[in-house]
Image (spheres, helix red, strand yellow):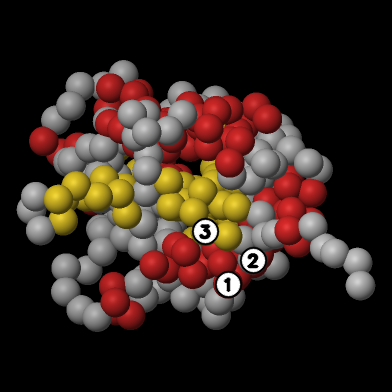
Amino acid sequence: MPSVSPKATRRPVVGIIGNAHMMNDRYEVHAAGHINSEAVAEVAGCVPLIVPADPRFVSVADLMAVCDGFLLTGGRPNVHPDEYGEPETPAHGAFDRGRDAITLPLIRACVESGQPFLGVCRGFQEVNVAMGGSLYPEIRDLPGRMNHRMPPDGTMEEVFAHRHVVTFTEGGVFHRLMGASAVMTNTLHGQGVARAGGRIVIDGLAPDGTPEALYVKDAPGFTLAVQWHPEWNAANDPVSRPLFTAFGDAVRAWAGQGKGR
């Protein structure tokens, strides 16, 4: 019986961008939610690999050589306003400058090379900033905007419950992917896109006009990003599943071209 090369049968690797946390108020860790790994493994069909997003430990070149694609996760820390030329204020909240130093150049490198990524919540905001855009520090303080933050109480099911409609551009990328011009999503974010970056196409909006879905125009690879959290119940949710399935297909296509490791 002929032997099978492990490389020929391996699943492609998705680097899941980790966030810096302090465990028990004294132990520093890099972590990513279990639901991110679950969505990558079970829906995208790839190997989830949590990335310590800190330039002391990894470089953009390292990550692009090891991983076939990237999931730019959500997280409590925000992109520092220095990255889009604005002063820091208390409204901007907590930061993770190590993550900024990795993800922003990583996004730009992936846009250039065609290596696929999927942005989620903070990751959505990172894609916009990486391409020259800016962020509002607090959406709910803007006239006419709803509160997009997570509910302060409740079960996980209640926190991640669908809370508003996202309407896509008719005939656009997300409309074609979802097979629908409007879908229901969860919402767990405080910040949001203010000025869209160069080549950023806003392809979906909340009822109050807040950008919720985007991609990079004329990029050679998969560059979709959403402001909501599709990793929650990704295997069963009719909006999340096609998004992660399409992402997995793009990662496999990249790996199949021999451009992965």
* Residue wearing tag 3: 48
| 260 or 186, nearer to the observer | 260
Most extreme residue toward the right is 1
Q: Secondary structure at mark 3?
A: strand
Quarter of the image for the C terminus: give it: top right
* Residue wearing tag 1: 42
Count the labels in the image. Answer: 3
**Contact, CB < 8 Å: mark 2 with mark 1?**
yes
| 111 or 30, nearer to the observer | 30
Q: Secondary structure at mark 2?
A: loop
Q: Position of residue 201 (x, y in %)?
A: 58, 38
Q: Amino acid at mark 3?
A: Pro
Quarter of the image for the N terminus: give it: bottom right
> Which residue is at 52% across, 67% downward?
39
* Residue wearing tag 2: 45
Image position of 92 (left or right of 146): left
Q: Secondary structure at mark 1?
A: helix
Q: Position of residue 14 (x, y in %)?
A: 56, 52
Image position of 200 (left or right of 59): right
> Which residue is at 37% across, 39% downward?
53
Going from N to C along the chain, the mark reached first, 1 or 3, is 1
